[in-house]
Structure formats: C-alpha cells, structure tokens
Image (cartoon, grey):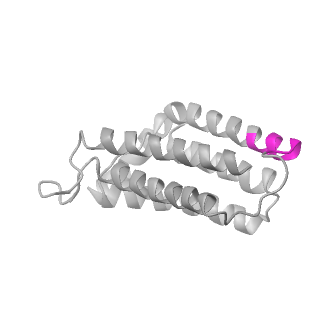
Amino acid sequence: MVTADRLIAVGIMVLSAYFMWHATVLPIGWNGMTGGPGGGAFPFWLSAIMMATAAAILVRSLRGKTDYSGDFFDPDTLRSVVSVVIALVVTIGLIPWVGAYIALPLFLLWYLRIFGKHGWVLTASLTIATPLFLFFFFEVTLKILLPKGLTEPAFTPLYAIFF
C-alpha cells in the first residue's frame, strides 16, 4: 500500500510537470488585453497545486506517517472506482453533443443520488448550482466559452445580456 502511494504520487508529479510545461505555451500571467488571466494560467496553477499535493503525499509516505494495512483495492472499492471511471468517460463523451451544462449535471445527479445515495435536497441543489456557477465563472467572468452542443441556441439570450 505504501509502495502504491509512492508510485502514484510520483506519477502525478510527473504528469503535473508535463501539464505545467504544456500550459506555458499560452500566457500564464495577467492578460492586459482581455482584462483577465492568460489562457495557460489555470492549467499551470492547478497543475502546480496538484504537484504540491502529490509531493506532500510522497513526503508523508517516506517519513513513515502512514497507517495503511491491507490490499490497495478490495473488490468493493475496485467496483466503485470502475463505475465512477465509466461514468466520467460517458460524461466526457456526452459533452460535445449535449454540452457541458447538460452532461455535468447528469453526472452529478448520478454520482450524488444513485451512486452516493444522498438526499434529493443536496442532489438537486448541487445539480442546479454547478452549471450556474460554471456559466458565471467561466463565460461571464473569464470569458472562456464552454462547449454547449445542442444547447447552444438557448444561450443566445444570455449572451445578449452579459456581453
């Protein structure tokens, strides 16, 4: 289990370094022309946070601060991980056709209500609040358009209001 922690932490650190290097193709600082961060800012800094977190996991395992016992994945855990991975692949596959604002709430609905067995109040509030937050954060604030697929015509009135 400790070996798995170390291998995964190193793997995530390598991927983070690659993502950071690749993000520098676009500007990562403040872009004065658009009045916002450059196109590579979020990928770069999120990758940096991911690398720091993986490094902390690696240091913790090297210091012997882990209390793991047993297998890396028991059958129930493996089944859960596989079902979530399949749901994520389906969600990513749906984004070009139905758009992010439909695919992501569908995933949240499945993940919270069916997989996680949470109540309807939490499920409904997160399923509704997430696309609203994403719209205002990415499209209105940062001016980064997310894929809309079939729902593109529904956004025309919103663009008239916010742009």
Q: Is residue 118 placed above or below 83 in the rendered structure? A: below
Q: Residue 65 is drawn in which quadrant?
A: bottom right
Front-lying residue, 47 or 115: 47
- Dominant secondary structure (helix, strand or loop) of the stretch shown in magenta: helix
- Residue span colored magenta: 73-81
Q: Is residue 152 placed above or below 59 in the rendered structure? A: above
User: The C terminus lies in which quarter of the figure?
Assistant: bottom left
Q: Residue 144 placed where, x, y %?
A: 32, 49
Front-lying residue, 82 or 66: 66
From this viewpoint, which residue is outermost toward the front?
63
Q: Is residue 105 left or right of residue 134?
A: right
Q: Residue 89 placed where, x, y %?
A: 62, 34
> Is 79 a magenta residue?
yes
Q: Residue 63 is drawn in which quadrant?
A: bottom right
From this viewpoint, which residue is outermost toward the left?
33
Q: Residue 162 placed where, x, y %?
A: 30, 59
Q: Residue 143 placed where, x, y %?
A: 29, 53
How many numbered marks appear? Answer: 0
At x 71% / y 43%, what residue is drawn?
Answer: 84
Front-lying residue, 78 or 88: 78
> Is 150 a magenta residue?
no
Q: Is residue 141 left or right of residue 101?
A: left
Q: Is residue 94 left or right of residue 151?
A: right
